[in-house]
Image: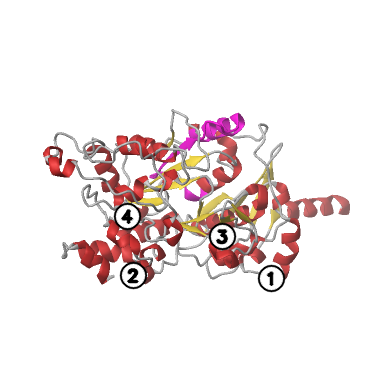
Amino acid sequence: MNYIFSYLIINTILILLPIIVYCKEDGLFVKNYIFAETKSITYRSIYSEVLKKDIPVFWKPPKFRELNCNKLLIGDFRYIAKERKNRKSMNETLYEFSTSCEHIKRRGYYPKEPVTEEEAKFPLAYAINVYQDYMKLEQQFLVMYAPQNHYCYAIDKKANPVFKEKLHSLAKCFPNIYIVKEEKELDHSGVNGNFYNYECMKLFRNKNYKYLFLLQNDDTPLKTNLELVKILQIYNGTIDMNIGDPIARQPITVNRKVSYKLNSLMMFKKSDKRYYDKTLGNMQIKIQKGLMQASIPKATVDYMLKKINIVKLLENLNTKNEYSDEVLWPTIFTNPYLRVPGWQHYLCNKKTIFSRYYMTRKTIFRTKRKECLSGFIRNGICILGIESLSHMRSWPHFFGNKFRSSFDAGASMCWLEHMYNKKFLFPFTGINENFYKRSTLIRYQKLKETEDNHRKICDMI
């Protein structure tokens, strides 16, 4: 009898496993979860203070569960020093890994309704170019997911067939995921990156959203959906773009065999009075450089789809020259002849202060090697690791670049688990509104309301 009683007690303890993770200040900490085993995957549930019900725990493969994410997130120096000697990496997800809708939705919580009324009224859209690392993409999608949002994935034609199959499986589980049908090759030059952006814009043509994010495979969320909504309400139609960045001032290499005159580009439609302006038509569009990643108001996207014709310019700039995906959007968003909603004059591109308030993506370039705590720089960009997590919690940016699972998948999983817990387990604690209100990009848009001289506006900031 005592043996049976002991057996029951032990098994009860194994089933109801309490855990306390993280610290209070940004709502990380998890306790009292319950787990259940299937044939191949362990699923656990936990009580959500936000939703007032049990939801699935953020799922991680077994070998990553031994990582003490709490110690990484609070910057425990000794623990980080020990773990960095044996980083937990991961290769591409195997064919055998289940991407059935049932299993996907047991690896995390996907709400069927907007979590808050504020989020319901401010849907977002994502255009993401991808090529590898399905597991990370699924976890990023889980953190970014809201049923009122829209998600467009554009897959590199060269990508592994298993990767493609799994991403298509994910799309079948959610009506608000769209995949670009015409596949093109992506590479480090940026070729076809803007083509894919534009295809996603067209897929979103009749969708309801307030802002569109242009992202890539390894851009990880730094803000919850509610935080993004709060921040972008402050932006109020401002385009968040990278201009004035010294990194972006590398030589601009474009196809010089084609014309960049507005009439050659067939930029204006016959319904637009600018179409008939011969002087304007002979103007050369001034090519600018920044970064592809941007946060764009729907009004700007609609203008590019309906009011002007950017296809010829896109085709002319879509080359295998270096950084070819980093010129189209900065060129359009800063051109005084096109005047897309939220535009800012290219005259301001000489001032680095504008780049300091570029928030869409945080990237640590090789020029700031001392800030690369992992010590690993690839293609001129710092790869984030477990050393980075405690610092990332204070970054004001929307997304961070980049985690690589082949280098430190444990860091990515701990970070995304933190974001998942922050999103669902604890009440919202607010954003630093004053920081975003100081944005030079936002100030520029406000000054435009009363000042027509854009050179003067640039000098005023």
Q: Position of residue 416 (x, y in %)?
A: 57, 54
C-alpha span from label 4 to label 2: 15 Å
**Earlier sequence position, callout 4 versus callout 1:** 1
Local secondary structure at mark 2: loop
Who is closer to the viewer here, 394 or 8? 394
The type of residue carrying mark 2 is Arg
State which region is magenta.
Answer: 142-171
**Between marks 4 and 1, how big is the CA–CA gap?**
39 Å
- Indicate the position of residue 144 as horizontal and vertical percent values: 47, 49
Q: Quadrant of the C terminus?
A: bottom left
Where is residue 275 drawn, in percent x and y? 15, 38
Q: Nearer the viewer, mark 3 or mark 2?
A: 3
Q: Please report the residue visible at 28 percent of the width from the left and 60 percent of the height from the top.
A: 347
Q: Which amino acid, mark 3?
A: Arg
Q: Amino acid at mark 1?
A: Phe
- Using a 10 Å C-alpha cutoff, classify the residue at mark 4 as few (fewer than 14 neighbours), some (14 to 19) or many (20 or more): many
Q: Which residue is mark 1?
A: 77
Figure check: 279 above or below 236: above
Q: CA distance from mark 3 to mark 1?
A: 24 Å
Residue neighbourhood size for the residue with mark 2, other residues' Cα within 10 Å, grouped as few (<14), some (14–19), many (≥20): few
Q: What residue is pinned by disc 2?
A: 438
